[in-house]
Image (spheres, rainbow, N blue to C red):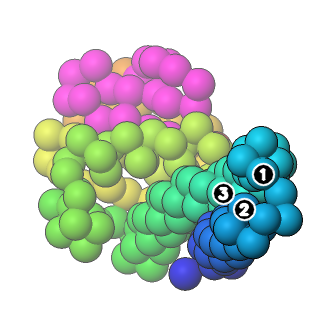
Amino acid sequence: MTSGRIVGILLIIAAIIVGLIGVAWLIAGVVGGAHGITGAILGGALLAVPVLLLVGGGVFLLVRSGREAKTDAERETLRRILDLVSSRGQIPISDLVIELASTRDQVQGQVHALVGMGVFSGYVNWDEGVLYSAEAASLRDLERCKHCGGELKLVGKGVISCPFCGTEYFLP
């Protein structure tokens, strides 16, 4: 559990406690004759302000911590892909799909995200389903496909592709 989630839950619990104490005090005042119904209504309206602020802050922190947990999980997945490819030099996409409990399309999107961030250099042949790690310097000088020998074409920022076999080369 993250600290934002814990604080959010504590704020909501505090709002409930403040609300219950305030309502009990207002009821006791009306029953005891210390103030009338209009005073209780005014007291309830004034009590609602801190209670709503506490609940709103708690809900905000809960939602934000959920988003942070999701982005942290995505970062961890990207880190795992980099570690697996770097340590093995090459890895079948099917192994990544199994290790990450993901789909092929998700892995492809994550590889493209790593390329977009400029942290991965290598190449992949999607037809064969193998991701290769390579030194960026050797890829910059590349003019022919390592797989089929075809001439390479620039297809996007940091991405060179072979139109013949579909191999994609990623430059940082």
In front of the other: 168 or 77: 77
Tags 2 and 1 touching, CB below 8 Å: yes
Q: Looking at numbered disc 2 in the image, what kind of residue is underneath it?
A: Val
Secondary element under disc 3, as helix, strand or loop, is helix
In front of the other: 130 or 102: 102
Label number found at residue 36: 1
**Labels 1 and 3: the sequence-earlier one:** 1
Q: Looking at numbered disc 3 in the image, what kind of residue is underneath it?
A: Val
Residue 44 location (% of width, % of height) = 73, 51
The reply to whether residue 32 is in sight is yes
Neighbour class for label 2 at 10 Å: few (<14), some, many (≥20)? some
Tags 1 and 3 touching, CB below 8 Å: no
Front of the two marks 1 and 3: 1
Mark 2 lies on residue: 30
**Labels 2 and 1: the sequence-earlier one:** 2
Question: What's the CA distance linking mark 2 and mark 3?
Answer: 26 Å
Secondary element under disc 1, as helix, strand or loop, is loop
Screen quadrant of the N terminus: bottom right
Q: Which residues are magenta?
A: 152-171
Screen quadrant of the C terminus: top right
Q: What residue is shown at x 50% (from left), y 42% (from top)?
A: 113
Label number found at residue 55: 3
Q: In the rendered structure, does residue 154 fall within the stretch colored magenta?
A: yes
